Image (cartoon, grey):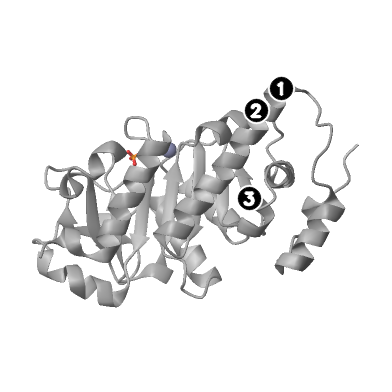
Amino acid sequence: MSIMDVTFVKGFVRLCNDGWLQGWHERNGGNLSYRIKPEEVEEVRPYFNEPSEWKEIGTTVPGLANEYFMVTGSGKYFRNVILDPADTSCIIELDDKGENYRVLWGLVNGGRPTSELPSHLMNHEVKKAASGGTHRVIYHAHTTNTIALTFVLPLTDEVFTRELWEMATECPVVFPSGVGVVGWMVPGGRDIAVATSELMKKYDVAVWAHHGMFASGPDFDLTFGLMHTVEKSAEILVKVMSMSPVKLQTITPQNFRDLAEDFKVELPEKFLYEKN
Ligand code: 13P
Ligand code: ZN
């Protein structure tokens, strides 16, 4: 047995490699975190090392006190995770106030958890509450087409959601609550974490203008699938906009309402506005 035989560790590593293969993780771009279930903590506990010193998270997440996370390391490359998970990722524990963390496993050659740890943990805290504890994965990727769109579309939740929904019939079923958009901000700190987690109260996806995306979900498949679906839709939109300044036909607001009824999803009316 090794820690690599543990199911959630395999899922974590596989997602990193899948994201790399999609081209979303140039150099050290992107990061991933997983909120470990109590029974899974017991599976990996035999592999823990001497704990590191407690260090400040950079924000406060009391809703995650005493929880354990698997997280990618700062400056580590997604393309290397499959080769050496113990160098490129870590398992951390939070203290009883949700103010500090310590490393229990991984980062064997030094380093620290992702610089986006405040955003990951604030998103986890919001999604844990909003999903009744089912959401466990937060994934940040530098998704090429979605980033490209942040230069040409108005940076509003309404426009991004509607344009992405129109590009593929399945989209409103996969992300019925829509996507949120954060205007350009300095990454890696508490301010962008607060802005993103505010959007995560309503959405499972947040777009960071000129930077990338955050997605949240209950497991690795659903979270990767969500990121993949949004980014594929963005790719279609980039192609459509490259071919023509106007669409000759599209999915209409009434089409969306019909779809919502048959697929038993609720689509907020604010995204079904009439266009000129
Ligand atoms: P890290 O290497 O610190 O995870 O940062 C990568 C990134 O995408 C920052 O937004
Ligand atoms: Zn990034």
Give the CA distance from mark 1 to mark 3.
25 Å
* Residue drawn at point x = 51 percent, y = 31 percent: 144
Rate crowding at label 1 as few (under 14), some (14 to 19) or many (20 or more) other CA atoms within 10 Å. Answer: few
Q: CA distance from mark 2 to mark 1?
A: 6 Å
SS at mark 1 in the image: helix
Say which label, 1 or 3, has the lower sequence index: 3
| Residue 44 x %, y % | 18, 67
Q: Residue at 59%, 34% (x, y): give it.
A: 235
Tag 1: amino acid: Met
View quadrant of ligand 1: top left
Q: Position of residue 81 (x, y in %)?
A: 24, 44
Q: Is residue 111 left or right of residue 127?
A: left
Nearest to the observer: residue 246 or residue 68: 246
- Cα–Cα gap, marks 2 and 3: 20 Å
- Mark linked to residue 259: none
Tell me the SS state at disc 3.
loop
Q: Toward which corner of the image does residue 275 lie, by quadrant?
A: top right
Q: Which residue is mark 2?
A: 239
Question: Can you see residue 115?
Answer: no
Query: Foreground mark, 2 or 3?
Result: 2
* Residue 5 in view (yes/no): yes
Q: Residue at x 21, y 59 (%)?
A: 102
CB under 8 Å between callouts 2 and 1? yes
Question: Residue tagged by mark 1?
Answer: 243
**Residue located beneath label 3 in the image:** 179
